[in-house]
Image (spheres, helix red, strand yellow):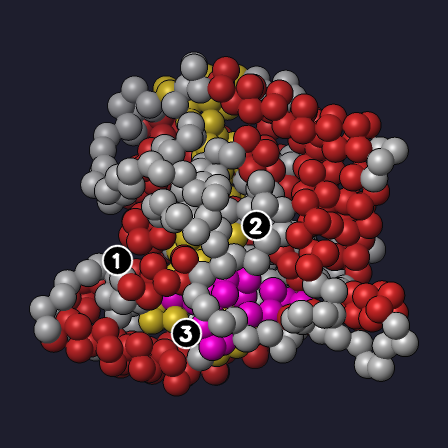
Amino acid sequence: MHQLTLAEIARALADKSFSSEELTRTLLARIQQLDPQLNSFISITEEQALQQARAADQRRAQGETGALLGAPIAHKDLFCTQGVRTSCGSKMLDSFTAPYDATVVARLAQAGMVSLGKTNMDEFAMGSANESSHYGVVKNPWNLEHVPGGSSGGSAAAVAARLLPAATGTDTGGSIRQPAALTSLTGLKPTYGRVSRWGMIAYASSLDQGGPMARTAEDCALLLQAMAGFDPNDSTSVDEPVPDYSANLNAPLEGLRIGLPKEYFGAGLDPRIGELVHNSVKALEKLGAVVKEISLPNMQHAIPAYYVIAPAEASSNLSRFDGVRFGHRCENPKDLTDLYKRSRGEGFGPEVQRRIMVGTYALSAGYYDAYYVKAQQIRRLIKNDFMTAFEQVDVVLGPTTPNLAWKLGAKSSDPVAAYLEDVYTITANLAGLPGLSMPAGFVDGLPVGVQLLAPYFQEGRLLNVAHRYQQVTDWHTRAPNGF
């Protein structure tokens, strides 16, 4: 059962090959047995999962036929989940139990999905390796000495290790696509505003976006169908009709115009990854696609712009964690200032503190115009580059990451080196575009991902290209040894 994709599980449940409760018990036992090697879960909600599975079986017995009814899922631990600890991977929220469900959680529950637990993550989603979690590092199932990527590394490791078929993630600068690439999964960051952020604990509000992580594009289409749509509770949610994402998965790619940005293939890219990217381009050309070189001239400014904007928004969003209303509170504060200082100093880890400091500095009176305003101007130039590119091509293709998954601890003392791993992914967040990473091969036994970007609300096109590619390749079907 654990080797089945979400789509295969949906068909098996419909055929009554097994019940949701049988599947849930099998996967919970697998998590208990194998997750100690990976540390991919923070909380396992066994009792709740079995209740949800029985309810799903009952709904099927009464004639309901939803594709996701009775299928398992796990949520990144920054989606509020009623009655369940929602920690954001931080000591600050270690004792916080969410009083309500995030919209994403509620919609997937409404579709009948069974939540097995909450997955590990970089603290407050700040990181590229899943090494900043208060609950310890997550390990890559393809090689337990390497990182799985971040910040959705727990979700990625759990799905890659076949502990369950799919999980939710969030993407602020690549945090769905980068771990998907490093663990051989399909990960989709939707258009900004396509999926509600209500109940998703914020890191950088103008960049954060929730999305699905699974083994195939077909599975991501099923999940996005349930997750997407307007939410009046979220002021950044876009009131745009949700298409049937599964309807055009098999549409032919004849005449599809693929753009290869010349800036993607310069210094900094591991040439072995570059070779696999070009192999994937050849496979798509055989399916009828046409390839053209394009330019994204302002891409070189993306990392500096992102690492001003994201920390600035983080410093504002995380100011609410002050030891007064909820979250960690220090022992025996002398006065209010001591309460604030010690609660935040004890509750936040080093990476979060670093980004709060950077953001506060960039927003301060003397530096706001020089840093924050300038970064927002660069953001607009990056968006304009993509708008120009999409006048010539239908999708942009390139590597998801410049390097393979690195060894645990290898970049811990050099945060800038870790930041540079997001060089290909952060432009989609700055511009608000949808992006998808799909498995494209292996180097030295470690997975490589290829990224696709499309115009706003063209998630269906990304899923179509990835699905057709996955019909002629088998990278997405391979499982790590021991799992």
Q: Quadrant of residue 2?
A: bottom left
Q: Which residue is mark 3?
A: 116
x and y percentages locating residue 144 in the rendered image: 61, 67
Which numbered tag is attached to residue 175? 2
Secondary structure beneath label 3: strand
Along the polypeptide, which appears first: circle 3 or circle 1?
1
Q: For the point 30% across and 49% down, which residue is it?
A: 225
Front-lying residue, 280 or 255: 255
Q: Nearer the viewer, residue 228 or 131?
A: 228
User: How far apart are the two marked residues, 3 and 1, measured between alpha carbons?
Assistant: 18 Å
Query: Which contiguous range is marked in magenta?
Result: 73-90
Can residue 375 be spotted in the picture?
A: yes
Residue 439 location (% of width, % of height): 45, 47
Above or below 37: residue 235: above
* Residue 284 lies in the magenta-colored region: no
Residue drawn at 84 percent across, 36 percent down: 365
- Crowdedness of circle 1 by 10 Å Cα count: few (<14), some, many (20+)? some
Marked residue nearer the N-terminal end (2 or 3): 3
- Which of pointers 2 and 1 lies earlier in the amino acid sequence? 1
Give the residue type that dot 3 points to.
Leu
Measured as percent of width and height from the top left, residue 335 is found at 88, 72
- Which marked residue is nearer to the observer: mark 2 or mark 1? 2
Label 2 to label 3: alpha-carbon separation? 21 Å
Q: Nearer the viewer, residue 38 or 387?
A: 387
Q: Amino acid at mark 1?
A: Ala
Residue 425 lies, with reference to residue 382, above or below; the image says below
Q: Which residue is mark 1?
A: 7
